[in-house]
Image (cartoon, rainbow, N blue to C red):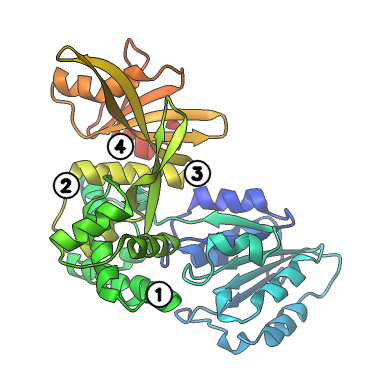
Amino acid sequence: MVEYVKRERYLQRLIDRRDNGDVKIITGPRRSGKSFLLKTIYRDYLVSQGVPQENIIIVSLDEDDENNQSELVDKELLKAYVYERLLSNEDNYYVFLDEIQEIDGFEKVVNGLNAKENVDVYITGSNSHLLSSDINTIFRGRGDEVHVEPFCFKEFCEGRTETRDELWKEFYTYGGLPGLRKRKTPQQKVTYLQRLWEKTYIADVVERHNIRNTVALDALADQLCSSIGSFSNPNNISNVLLSVQHCKVDAETVSSYISYLEDAFLFRGSRRYDIKGKRYYESLKKYYCTDIGLRNARLNFRQQEITHIMENVIYNELCSRGYLVDVGMIESRELVNGKQEYKQYEVDFIVTDGMRKYYIQSAYAIPDEDKMEQELKSFRKIEDSFQKIVIVGYDIATYMNDDGIIFMGLMQFLENDAIL
């Protein structure tokens, strides 16, 4: 059997949803491995569980797939093809529809199949045509989304023989898109990433939203890549685009373009949350790139600030593990030069998973007591008892200090899913 990265995190999510009566929709950035997860990894799992091969019905409409079945783009032909293979009302069948958005009216076929008691339906679709925001409408509330990310660092290292330091440097430079495994030289990797930006991601956004001002869209993508982990809103981004890139675009257009880039899963916006006031600041967000290699390629590998890259990698890892992630702020009234003033302290990430919550600071280095105090000051202002964690950029034995704050190394965090 050919060895491949198992994507165990996502395989388990599909296993957990097997035969649950909903349409399973695999979303995520283009080239993040959605189709491979479904048609190879999950198919192999089903076969290992005793499902006959003929009971797994796969239709691939991906133009890049060597088994492309583009003749089935008519929904009636697709329906006939699938139903001809449903030979029994007693057996369970698994229907995989890859790049389903190529078919006009596909939702009627999918909903019809899903209504059958012995059919479990799974679909993937290009994020520029099948967005998570459309799922409830399209599938009448019976859609169950599994969002797939590029490789996390642990997956990136799977099957590799280089040292961990070599792998980390490659990961934070070129990112985790699975297709990079086939590119052997730095030049090939750079070309691959930059071509994806222009020919796949940006082209999809322009086509879907009929964007005419592509200069402004490009400038906005550059600005978001340059300012990862910084608070932004459409007004200040508009001002920066004008002053730095000499690109005039109003705040309303900036807001629309950001939403398009988020819908394409190129960026995520994380809202600012007031920990004491228990409310969101709707106008302020921090934006992170879904894949750090795409971010670097967009900037021609010019801005390699490891502190910001580390923060982005931690954010992506938390999202990949299924956590909800906000950025935090806590306000404190303090005496400054004899006067009472309000001061604000940042918490890099507020991480929640049901009833569990964690506060996390990303600190590449803590060289002295002043830096230590800076990192911990916001934690000391928080009055609840949820776990507080500092992740540093070097290897340390995980420990808890006298204040109950946990310190751990970046690699310890990235390599151990159960560490939170």
Q: Amino acid at mark 3?
A: Gly
Q: Is residue 317 above or below residue 234?
A: above
The image shows residue 252 at horizontal and vertical percentages of 36, 62
Q: Nearer the viewer, mark 4 or mark 2?
A: 2
Q: Secondary structure at mark 4?
A: helix
Asked if disc 4 and disc 2 are in contact, CB closer than 8 Å, the reply is no
Residue corresponding to mark 4: 411
Q: Would residue 46 be found to the left or right of residue 376 on screen?
A: right
Which of disc 2 and disc 1 is earlier in sequence? Answer: 1
**Looking at the image, do the residues carrying marks 1 and 3 touch, with CB atoms under 8 Å apart?**
no
The residue at which mark 1 appears reads as 204
**Of callouts 1 and 4, the N-terminal one:** 1
Q: Nearer the viewer, residue 59 or 343?
A: 343
Residue at which label 3 appears: 322
Do we see residue 402 in this rendering?
yes
Measure how far apart labels 3 and 4 are at the Cα level: 19 Å
CA gap between label 1 and label 3 equals 26 Å
Using a 10 Å C-alpha cutoff, classify the residue at mark 2 as few (fewer than 14 neighbours), some (14 to 19) or many (20 or more).
Answer: few
Q: Residue furthest front?
A: 339
Distance (Cα) linking label 1 and label 2? 29 Å
Question: In the rendered structure, which disc, 4 or 2, sits on the residue that comes first in sequence?
Answer: 2
- Disc 3 element: loop
Q: In the rendering, at what x and y percent does residue 288 appear? A: 33, 50
Secondary structure at numbered mark 2: loop
State the residue at coordinates (60%, 85%). 73
CA–CA distance in space, label 4 to label 2: 18 Å
Q: Amino acid at mark 4?
A: Met
x and y percent of residue 49 in the render?
A: 68, 55
- Secondary element under disc 1, as helix, strand or loop, is helix
* Residue holding disc 2: 305
Q: Position of residue 243 (x, y in %)?
A: 14, 59
